Each structure stands twice: as C-alpha cells, then as structure tokens.
Amino acid sequence: MLSQRHRATNLHGGARGAEPGAGLDRARGQFGPRRIRFDTQSHRSRRRPPGRIIRNSENIGFCRANNAGYAIAAGHRYVLFLNPDAFLETDFIERAEQWMEDPAHQDVAVVTGSLLGFDIDRRAPTGTIDSTGIFQTWYGKWFDRDQGRPWTGELPSAEHEAVPAICGALMFCRTAALETVIPAGTRAVFDEEFFMYKEDIDLSVRLRRRGWRLSYRSGLTCFHCRGWRGRAAMTPAARWLSARNELRVCFRNGGKGLLYSVLKVLFVPFESALIDAAKRFRRSSAERTGGRPSRP
C-alpha cells in the first residue's frame, strides 16, 4: 500500500488540520503487505500511522514520491495509491482484492470506487460526490464525473463500469499491469516530468493503450478531503504546470482535444492577470465598505 505526502501548492492544501496518515490508520488490519508513506516537506505530526514512513528534505513531487514508494514495494501482487487526505471505508481493500482476483476481471489494471467529499474543518462528510471516474468532454477537457452532486447511497444498476481515467487519490492497481507501462531501466509508474497534476490521467491513458481496462465500482467507497479550492486559489506556476501537463496528455492520447489544450496553455498568463485584478477589486471594495461585502 502506497501513500504520498508532499506540500505542493493546492494539491493537499485542503487538508488543514487533518491528521496525516488517516488513510493508513483506516486501512489497518485490511491489508497484509507493507504500507509505505512518503512525506515530502510536510508538517511533522505527533501521530505515528502504521507502516513505514520515508521523509524527504525537499519537495520531490507527487510522481517521484509515488515511484520511490512503488520501487520499495516491488513484488506485491497489488498496490494501492492513496492520498494522505483520503480514508477508506472498512473492508475496502479486501473487497477490491477479491474483485480483482475474479477470473473475469484479469484484464483490469486499476479499480477505484466512489470518492466522497469530506469537510476537514467540520470533520464530517459533505454529502456530495468527489469523483466517480475521470472523463473527457468532446472538446478535450478532462473532469471528475459527478463532482459536487449529492451522494444518496443509491448505486447504479451496473456493479462496475469501464472508465477512461481514474483519480490518483484512489487507485487499486494490479502490479502486473503497471509493469507493462514502466519504461525500461526504471521503476517509474508515473512520468516524473509531470511532477504533479494530470499524472493520473497520463497513467490511465498509457494503461488503456496497452489493452488494460480501468474500472469504477460504485460499492467501494472512500472519503476524500481534497485540497482543491478552485483555479483562483492556484499560483500562476501551478496553473501553468496543470495546463502544460494537459497538453502532454493530449499528445499521448492521439491528439484529442489539441485545440482546447493549446488554448488553455496560451490563456494561463491572461488568466493569472484577471484573477489578480479580481482579487484587488474585492479588496478595494471591502475597504470602501468597511470590510462589509458590497450590495449585489
């Protein structure tokens, strides 16, 4: 079981006040193989989650941290990539493993479940869905399906379904499948040139091109605090990295969405200027009204 911890802008910013390693604690007793957690420049915690913790003195990024953990965990049949701000429902791993062992599912590389929102400030579920798989619009934009929709607990008629891509916060992977996309002479599951953002989509695309399936099982649930606060909260560098990586995925995905991806990269400088201008306007408006929001 692999989990990563790295302080990159906005990736896990929403985990304020979270107890690091919550996902590992919840998984205690579910899984026999080793649990490895990479901690890249995160705040030290008094808690000691189960498993092996490897701390880095610098921010090596989502991709490199996970690759280092994967190299250590080599030899296991399955690997779980789990964000530190995500925690599993009881028996998630056992059920996922049993499903993957079914002879009918031997061509499935990765299975994920229903990622549900969790408010770390209130320490309670948000009642909404975070992701049920990653999809792509006709013009090329990748998005988390069902994000923000109410979670009723009602499951769709199909027990599972194939999806184009899977959110990197929760990926239960078949090691044999991952080995087919690792470049020769490396242990790099994720492309380290991505650093962070869209690396999960890139891995999904590479696996599907090798003939593997990616599956979503609605009955497997996991809560995700998600540090995402919208593009306005991202630094210009982070917005650029996200747009650049989306263009990388586009080229690896047969060029689908090329126009959208190129325009997104070109728009980043203007987007940053517009966001900064909007922030200045809100500050000046608040000052004129004595800190009170202006009348709509």
Image (cartoon, rainbow, N blue to C red):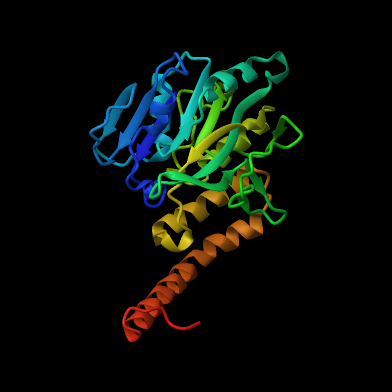
Q: For residue 280, which quarter of the picture?
A: bottom left
In terms of depth relative to the viewer, which is nearer, 232 or 290? 290
Residue at 58% across, 46% down: 129
Whether residue 158 is visible to the viewer of this picture, yes or no, is yes
In the displayed image of the protein, which residue is found farthest to the right? 157
| Spot occupied by residue 96 in the image (x, y as percentages of width and height) | 59, 22
Q: For residue 84, which quarter of the picture?
A: top left
| Spot occupied by residue 122 in the image (x, y as percentages of width and height) | 40, 49
In terms of depth relative to the viewer, which is nearer, 266 or 93? 93
The reply, left or right, for residue 139 in relation to residue 57 is right
Residue at 62% across, 42% down: 252
In terms of depth relative to the viewer, which is nearer, 61 or 55? 55
Whether residue 196 is visible to the viewer of this picture, yes or no, is no
Considering only vertical position in the picture, is 162 above or below 127? Answer: above
Q: The N terminus is located in which quarter? A: top left
Q: For residue 205, which quarter of the picture?
A: top right
| Spot occupied by residue 87 in the image (x, y as percentages of width and height) | 45, 34
Considering only vertical position in the picture, is 144 above or below 273? Answer: above
| Spot occupied by residue 117 in the image (x, y as percentages of width and height) | 51, 45
Residue at 69% across, 27% down: 211
The reply, left or right, for residue 254 in relation to residue 59 is right
State the count of labels.
0
Considering only vertical position in the picture, is 5 above or below 176? Answer: below
